[in-house]
Image (spheres, grey):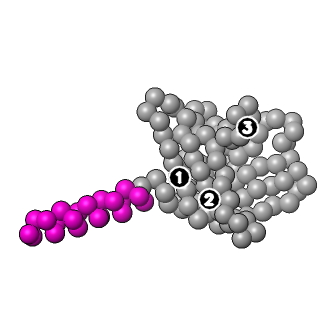
Amino acid sequence: MKLRKYLIAFTILFVVFASKCGKNATIPDELVGIWKSPTFKYRDTFFELRKKVIIFRTKEGDVNSYTITKMKREKKRNDEWILYTIYYQHNNLKTEFTFYYHPSQNGLIRFKNQLNLVWKKAEH
């Protein structure tokens, strides 16, 4: 009977731990920084990732900052690109920012909905 209780408790802990893996609100160090695209269309824009904040600068010069509520990381076995989804609140709506990250060249980012564009980490 005791063994059964321990197994149930272990199973519950494992399920809770597994559901939290890959889903926290802290950005990994390799993503922290200002990201810019060399594409002419986006020359005056950027997005910045901090540990718990995401910031966007628009073409018009507006800068918008949001607190990250959750982050999800997905890595496929034979793919060098990592899929990240950052969740934040915007106008009381849950918003997702999804992109692929590659560690080469000090980091490359491609938006999931714009795979033809590349964003690179700005030099300090």
Q: Looking at this view, is 35 or 82 the one in front?
A: 82
Give me the residue at 88% from left, 50% from top.
59
Give the labeled residue for mark 2.
87
Q: Are marks 3 and 2 in contact (CB under 8 Å)?
A: no
- Amino acid of disc 1: Lys
Residue 82 among magenta residues: no
Q: Are marks 2 and 1 in contact (CB under 8 Å)?
A: yes
Q: Is residue 104 above or below residue 7?
A: above
Give the labeled residue for mark 3.
114
- Please tell me in which quadrant of the rendered image residue 118 appears: top right
Upstream in the sequence, badge 3 or badge 2?
2
**Helix, strand or loop status at disc 1:** strand
- Amino acid of disc 3: Gln
Residue 9 among magenta residues: yes
Q: Residues within 10 Å of mark 3 (few under 14, many from 20)?
A: few
Q: Is residue 35 above or below residue 90?
A: above
Give the labeled residue for mark 1.
72
Secondary structure that dominates the magenta span = helix
Give me the residue at 30% from left, 59% from top.
14
Residue 120 visible, this orientation:
no
Q: Which mark is residue 60?
A: none
Q: Which residues are magenta?
A: 1-20
Q: Looking at this view, is 47 or 121 the one in front?
A: 47
Give me the residue at 64% from left, 47% from top.
98
